[in-house]
Image (cartoon, helix red, strand yellow):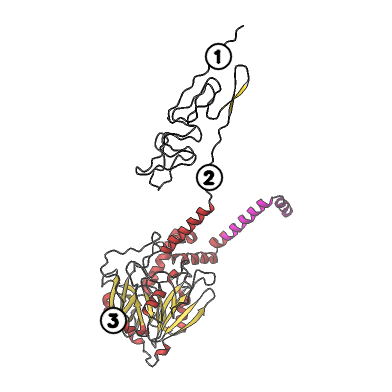
Amino acid sequence: MVTSIANHFRGYSWLKRIFLVIAICIFLSSSFLFLTPPGTYIREYLAQTVITTQHRDWAWIFVGAKRRDEMVAEVQNLTEANSVEKQDLGAVQFNKNRSIESLVRVEDISGQFWKGKKMYVYDPRTIRVVVPAKQGEGERITSMVQRTGAVAGINGGGFNDPDGLGNGFAPIGVIMSGGNILYTDQEGSIPQQIVGFTKEGTLIIGKYSIDELLKLGVTEAVSFYPRVIANGKGLITSGDGGWGRAPRTAIGQKADGTVIFIVIDGRQTSSVGATLKEVQDIFLEDGVINAGFLDGGASSEMVYNNDLITSPSSRYGERRLPSAFLVFDHPDQVQVKNVWEGLTHIDPGGAYDHPDYLREQAELKAKQGKTTPTPKPTATPTPKSTEKNDDDKESSVPSGSAKPGTSTKPGSSPTGSTGPSGSTNSNPTTQPGDGATSSPPAGGSATVKPSATPTPTPGGGAAGTGGATGGTATTKPTPTNGTGGSSAPTTQTSTAPTSTTKPN
């Protein structure tokens, strides 16, 4: 039995063998992914990773639409549950004996699937929220650092980001700096996801209303989530946090007041990204008692001494952002202007106005134009025709003449001649967007601008001259020279020659 099957397989062509192997691989992998517990775990893990991106809807490919919606709801419910517990503000005892020289320290960190940076900020009162300098557009972190003279910085809160190409000027939630509310999309009594600092330097993470923030003395704040450590307890106790692997930006505080910034690179061959649980464990190893996440993905980055020291996953490099946490030698001298003041409408931008995207599309279009050759118009030669006379002798008919017994149709012209409006047969239409109609009206002539000056057309006279040399053919009963060029566009009808009877 086995031998007969093997012989039958040997009789297959190489193409059939390839298709058979592919079919077997698809069957085995599908059976593993959909019929075994490890396969189910892999599919849900991939779906979690997609859910954290801007292409959340595509997660149905791995788990189906129903399970995808359930997983999204689970993540949202976990985020809400972890943000409820209020912080113990007395848990932080600030160490005020450090010198200004030990303001920050940066070190490399890495895991099995990722690498990143960890920054220690020893005096939390040196941290300020900074926003863009002009209306209508976010600002890159390196630009903010250079403009304000900051020592270091990381990206801050979330924003409306159409197509992943937003302009970074439409924040989500609240932005506070220096005790002033620069932006909010909620009323003061509605709780929001908050990451901020009190004027004493205590990190506040959780769900608070603006009214509560003002009572707590919060002066710097943005909106993002989730919270992963509350009052010394890790909130992710099972699984990896449900958000898959991605670039991450997170912030935490130790009991002595030291603030830790963590930025993980992701979506790259050198660094896939970290899970929420992995970042939580890094904080717990450092003794962090409160921690949460800031905007991640393509926005994740860290700047130190005017240099970008991480690798953003955006193909355009640094993104324009609405807010950042920056570290200053003299934070009390920093003035942050409210660029949203007085605005009634904020345009989040998108693909239609993203400068890098538009430049990329223009370059692609230019390359396509160079690689596609434009065919040149070629003149069609008019062949000489022959006829036989009454004595069965051949004689040539000059170019431009028609055979006896034929006539030109009304409205038509010979090859290479100019029609009634001067448009040649080789180019009957104009290109859209040049101010003329893209298709000619009845009669075969293209419409041009009323104020346009007639210009020469390839293979014919000037447009609108009404004719050219060698325009209309004339039929004669005997082979003679043609009439040459007729300036009138009318068609002459020829009469067939009358046969002559020879005498007996």
Residue under numbered circle 1:
499
Task: Identify whether 426 is placed above or below 349.
Answer: above
Rendered view: 191 above or below 15: below
Q: Which residue is mark 3?
A: 216
Disc 2/disc 1 C-alpha distance (Å):
47 Å
Dot 2 amino acid type: Lys
- The earlier-in-sequence mark between 3 and 2 is 3
Residue 118 can be seen, yes or no: yes
Query: Is residue 9 in the magenta section?
Result: yes
- Observer able to see residue 204: no
**Magenta segment, prevailing SS (helix, strand or loop):** helix
Name which residue lies at 52% across and 74% down: 114
Left or right relative to 247: residue 480 = right
Q: CA distance from mark 1 to mark 3?
A: 117 Å
Place of residue 163 in the rendered image (x, y in percent of width and height, measured from the top left): 41, 61
User: In the rendered image, which residue does mark 2 sit on?
Assistant: 376
Residues drawn in magenta: 1-29
On the image, the x and y values in percent for residue 378 come to: 54, 41
